[in-house]
Image: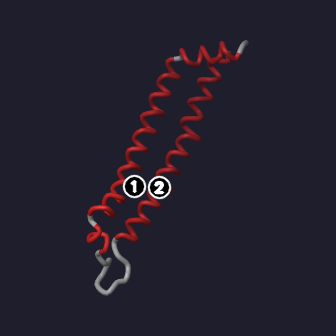
C-alpha cells in the first residue's frame, strides 16, 4: 500500500476531521489564555505602574508586581504541562487509532 493512499484515507476519515477540530480548538483556547495572562501583565506594567509598585504588606520590601510576575511564569509552566500531557495521551491515542484504521 502506497503512503499516498494512506494519507488520502486519513484525510477523508471523519475521525481525522474531528481530531483536527478538537486539537485546533484546544490549542486556540490555550493560546488565548496565555495571551490574556501575559499581555495583561504587560499592560499593567505599561499603564498601572502604581498598582504594581504597591507593597505586599506594611513594611514589606516586595511589591505586588514581583509575585504577579512569578505567577505569569508559573502559569506558563502549568499551561504548557497541561497541553503536553493531553497531547501525549489523548491526542496521540486518537492519532494512532486513525493511522491504524487507515493502514488496514
Identify whether 54 is placed above or below 38: below
Q: Residue at x 39, y 55 (%)?
A: 38
* Residue 88 horizontal side relative to residue 71, left or right: right
Viewer-side residue, 100 vs 46? 46
Labelled pair 1, 2 in contact (Cβ < 8 Å): yes
Q: Quadrant of the N terminus?
A: top right
Q: Secondary structure at mark 1?
A: helix
* Residue 61 horizontal side relative to residue 15, left or right: left
Viewer-side residue, 12 vs 103? 12
Q: Residue at x 29, y 68 (%)?
A: 49
Per the rendering, the mark at residue 38 is 1
Asked which quadrant contains residue 89, the reply is: top right
Q: Quadrant of the C terminus?
A: top right
> Picture coordinates of residue 36 (x, y %)?
35, 50
Viewer-nearest of discs 1 and 2: 1
Per the rendering, the mark at residue 76 is 2
> Picture coordinates of residue 20 (x, y %)?
49, 28
Identify whether 63 is placed above or below 15: below
Identify whether 62 is placed above or below 18: below
Viewer-side residue, 100 vs 11? 11
> Picture coordinates of residue 18 (x, y %)?
47, 24
> Picture coordinates of residue 72 (x, y %)?
42, 60
Circle 1: is it few (<14), some (14-19), or many (20+) Cα within 10 Å? some
- Of the image marks 1 and 2, the number of the one nearer the N terminus: 1
Amino acid at each position: 500500500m502506497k503512503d499516498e493512499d494512506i494519507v488520502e484515507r486519513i484525510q477523508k476519515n471523519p475521525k481525522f476531521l474531528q481530531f483536527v477540530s478538537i486539537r485546533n480548538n484546544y490549542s486556540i483556547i490555550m493560546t488565548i489564555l496565555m495571551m490574556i495572562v501575559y499581555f495583561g501583565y504587560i499592560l499593567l506594567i505599561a499603564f498601572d505602574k502604581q498598582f504594581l509598585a504597591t507593597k505586599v504588606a506594611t513594611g514589606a520590601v516586595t511589591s505586588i508586581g514581583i509575585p504577579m510576575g512569578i505567577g505569569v511564569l508559573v502559569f506558563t509552566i502549568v499551561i504548557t504541562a497541561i497541553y503536553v500531557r493531553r497531547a501525549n495521551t489523548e491526542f496521540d491515542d486518537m492519532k494512532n487509532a486513525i493511522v491504524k484504521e487507515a493502514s488496514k
